[in-house]
Amino acid sequence: MKPSPAVQFSGAQGLLATLGAIQPQAIAVYGLGVVAQNVLSALRQYRVVGLMDKDPSNRGRSWYGHVVLGDDDLSRLGVKAIVIAASDVYWGTIADRIAPLCRRLGIATVFLNGELAGKSTGELWAPLTDVVERTILDKEIVEHDVISFDLFETLVTRLVSRPDELLELAVARASAEAAAKEDLLHARKAAETKCRARWGAFTFSLTTIYDEMKSANGITERVGNALRCSELEVEEDLARPRRAMLQVLQESLAAGKEVCITTDTHLPRESLTAILRRCGLNDMPRLLVSWEEGGSKANGKLFSRLKDQYPKARIVHFGDQRDSDVQQANRSGVDACRIASPVECVLASRWRPVLTQARTTHDGVVTGLVARHLFEDPFARRLGDGRIEVASLRRFGYLFFGPLLLAWLGWLARMLRSRPADTVLFLAREGYLLTTLYNWLRIEADWHDLPEGIYFATSRRMAVVAALRARDDVASLLREDFSGSSEELLRLRCGLADNRGSSDDALTNTDPKTIPLLNQHMGRILANAASERERYLAYIERLGIKSSSRVALADLGIKGSIQDALQRMLGRALSGYYITGFFGASNPFGMHDNTFALFPGPSSMVYRYHILSESVLVAPHGMCLHIGPDGAVVHAPARMNQNLFAKKAEIHQGIREFVADWLSAGIDPASAQLSPGLIEWLFAQAMSETIALSDEVRSTFYVDELYRAATERRIWD
């Protein structure tokens, strides 16, 4: 006899008992997936006033007959309990996300098993205690005749943090219109829910789901087939191997063991084969697929089928789910070992809060990429205090700068489309890497409607000196901080290389002695500026930039002093698109309408740690000083960031690998909806106590200055 709808998920009785004790006047259910629908069915006796979701774009929309609430709605509706309707893997993450709101409004957070969430655990970590080491697997292989492997998150991982995100990506691919996307996603999920209620979890095929979807919702054959194809494409495109586990499989075969892949899935066999081949497994072992067998691991019947295939063999199963892969296997007389998924490993580390920062489907791809990068190998060494080990420069680039630059370049593409430009100049020296990445994306992401990026020789010293035309311009040089000798002021700030100034005194920009010093050298300063300006303008002309050209500047940013100087030198406005700094209404140079930043300061963590960006976004040459008489760029002598450029190139390679992984998922960075909070959180971890940096990584980062002072130091000294 089938259980009633009220108890169709594990722990329902505990949930109802807890709610019975609390007696909340109104309940909200957190989640929009199949679990949420089952929970709503179980809570019929209670007043459920709406749903909740992390994505703010869903607020006001209706799912399963309930509207998605905003934070302000909870108090108005008298919500006193929020039931988290999600897999237990995500309970803590969601509880952390809503903990401040629940504390403020006095709302209880209840998990599906009836447990109440305590204080936020966002900064805590809980090491995994029920997963096995590689040596244990080796022992189990020796002792058993048949080695069974779970497929998803064991042999193969997907570049998302939640399975639902795969479906959301598929719907986005199949439908261009927002309204159609909502309808398709709702219809697809509702169809699976109906099939699950009728036959049980994972005991029906993807074709069955789409047949139900088309008949129940009036979805046309063309639209239904398009979404089905899109779903299969996304499943294949986002599949990646867990190489260490595939190695275990190969070694099991080499040891003469029978190998079987035992999977709960709706996907057709040919898609599973394509996924495994994509992940490097060309010789297919036996595939035991739940919907083909009419039973799942979740209900134990698939393990019975496995035992029927090998009636006298000793069988061990390796999988990531405590219930369906371990407990159900054991109940069926199959030995089992648990292998933690990449996302679960993140949740068990000090990076647990990263999942609370994810709000959109595309955020889920970012966190999925990060989780896979860190824990693709389930047997990799973990630090005992929960920190993430960053022992390589490539990992540093991948984790901290890959997401940041992906988000910024996608934003830059959108800005260039909304405010078209004929030329986009990436300012030296930060632009050395940025130009390469942008032009690469023009090809890989098909941004051919955007202008080619040009690496543009400039610096504050180069642009500001070339813009000096009068005494007042020279006097304005003292508005920016400076500390150093008279010789350094004339050389670094005014452009006079051979100035005969004193190297033994000490000046600041506010020192009364500076004005007489500048006046003493005024003629030479302005004459040198005129000469540098003439050569600089000739350089700009050689780049093909005309007086009528619409020019955009792209750079790390901070204040826009280079843009201000170039505008004064050229006598016209330019557009500036920056990673961080004081732009728009807060721009100190008055460029309110033509400067923009994705992460504006000063509250942004990207702004706060901008010296880190200055040490990563470097070029192999010293600071650009001016254009020489021969038309070539004259650079200052190389400093430590240049002497260590081979190491910087390793960081750059890690950044490129992150962007390449993103592109392999088939998502145009210009269409990516990424939450600034997630990108900033990841970036800020580079300077936090959640990571353990190796000495090699630490020793690579220098911050240098040749405009406000002649200084150089290691960031982590």
Image: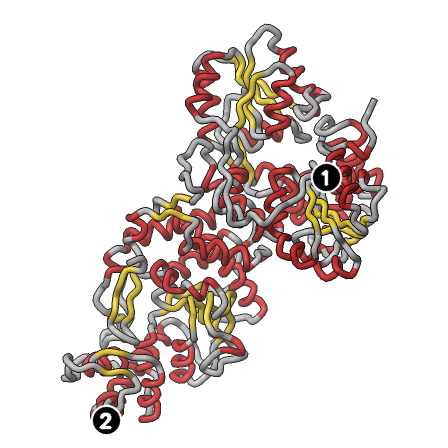
Q: What is the spatial separation of the Cα atoms under label 1 and label 2, in whole angstroms?
A: 76 Å
Disc with the residue nearer the chain's start (1 vs 2): 1
The quadrant of the image that shows the C terminus is bottom left
Say which element carries label 2: helix
User: In the rendered image of this protein, does residue 620 appear above or below residue 6?
Assistant: below
Residue with the mark numbered 1: 35
Q: How many marks?
A: 2
Disc 1 crowd rating (10 Å Cα; few below 14, some 14-19, many 20+) is: some
Asked whether 562 or 273 is in front, the reply is 562
The quadrant of the image that shows the N terminus is top right
Do we see residue 408 in this rendering? yes
Outermost residue, front side: 21
The residue depicted at 59 percent of the width and 16 percent of the height is 334
Q: Judge left or right: residue 668 versus residue 511.
A: right
Looking at the rendered structure, which numbered label has been put on residue 516?
2
Asked whether 449 or 529 is in front, the reply is 529
Contact between labelled residues 2 and 1, with CB atoms less than 8 Å apart: no
Percent coordinates x, y for residue 623 in the rendering: 28, 69
Residue 567, by quadrant, is bottom left
Q: How is the image coloured?
A: secondary structure
Percent coordinates x, y for residue 694 in the rendering: 32, 46
Mark toward the viewer: 1 or 2:
1
